[in-house]
Image: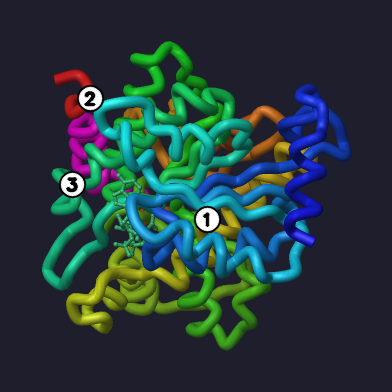
Amino acid sequence: NCLATKAISTIRPAFTRGIHATTTSTAKVAVLGAAGGIGQPLSLLCKLSPEVDELSCYDIVGTPGVAADLSHIPSKSSTLGRLPSPVKWPMGPNEGLKETLEGADVVVIPAGVPRKPGMTRDDLFNTNASIVKTLVEGCAQFCPDAMIAVISNPVNSTVPIAAEVLKKAGVYNPKKLAGVTTLDVCRANTFVANSQGWDPKDVDVTVIGGHAGITILPLFSRVNGAKFTDEELEALTVRTQFGGDEVVAAKAGAGSATLSMAYAGFVFAENVLKALRGEEVTQCAFVESSLTEAPYFASPVKFGKNGVEEILPLGELSAYEKQWLDKMMPELKKQIQKGIDFVNK
Ligand code: NAI
């Protein structure tokens, strides 16, 4: 079945490649860091999705095995697993990355090291900044029109890094770059539903700001029908901001959120695919933004055929939320600038 799918996709005329071309055309998703804790379950979810026709898994280790394993699942997408070109790379062109990225509509990047107990996301900067830079250079070269979804932390810095790399290559399109903050929304939905005795599927909390500690701001004042005391509101807000730390502590040195992040990354990517096909989708994302004084900001964003179609106005914040927004701003701006400087230094 898989071979048949692959054969069909190889004989398709070039102009039907890419999901913008026709209503029946194919959608290709590339996962960079696909052998990791997030990458594997994220690739599994993509393999199961009816929205995905081609799945390319890339990592510096393990992707031939991941792809072979996934390819036995009887779903429609073809599966490719590539490593960096063993002979030429890093001295010559990276054919493995090229094959992974060519024709991709959405590139999801969970490559990089995760946190250990006691670490902030910013502590990952030194390692992950270079990884994201290298991979986005590949995107600029091999799939400049793809939507790039950055999961690698610190997202507040890795998204500006990606933007600067794309600018240098002359292919930056702010509609096609986003940091994935969906896990913050998932956590906020779960925590508020638990507190109110609701089904989490009925809740959709708006989470704005960035993706690290106090830069994460859930707008619980907008959750219809929710009732909390001031103490409960504070506890829910702080738990959403530092929810990642609960997982890091519980994993006790074995990494950070992987399964919930794979779910969140998949929700984000699948929504983007639906939007590229013409459905209108609104979801929170960390994008270039003029809503606040921070040049990148997470907020509800309308996605459509061209990627980011519209950044929705923030609306009125409660006095409590306004305090947090003021408090986060210097931190968020600093982390963004750190990313910008990394590429331009
Ligand atoms: P992991 O260590 O299990 O997997 C990372 C994978 O990246 C590994 O397989 C590794 O070989 C690969 N990798 C490293 N350098 C690479 C390169 N140059 N090219 C391609 N692949 C490369 O880590 P995990 O748990 O999957 O986390 C990945 C990242 O996601 C971390 O930076 C983590 O902080 C971040 N994260 C982001 C979240 C968010 O909400 N945005 C939530 C949780 C984690």
Q: Which residue is mark 2?
A: 343
Which is nearer the N-term, disc 1 or disc 3? 3
Disc 1 element: loop
Residue 216: give x, y in percent of width and height: 35, 55
**The N terminus, quarter of image:** bottom right
Q: How far separated are the C-alphas under marks 1 and 3?
A: 31 Å
Residue 240: give x, y in percent of width and height: 37, 67
For the view shown, which residue lies furthest in the top direction?
170
For the view shown, which residue lies furthest in the front direction?
87
Q: Is residue 224 above or below residue 146?
A: below
- Residue 41 appears anywhere in the view: yes
Marks 1/3 in contact by CB < 8 Å: the verdict is no
Q: Which residue is mark 1?
A: 206
What residue is shown at x 41% (from left), y 30% (from top)?
138
Q: Is-magenta flag for residue 301? A: no
Disc 2 element: helix
Q: Residues within 10 Å of mark 1 (few under 14, many from 20)?
A: many
- Camera-side residue of 207 and 285: 285
- Camera-side residue of 195 and 131: 131
Residue 41: give x, y in percent of width and height: 50, 68
Q: Which residue is mark 3?
A: 127
- Residue 323 appears anywhere in the view: no
Mark in front: 2 vs 3: 3
Image colouring: rainbow
Q: Is residue 119 above or below residue 102?
A: below
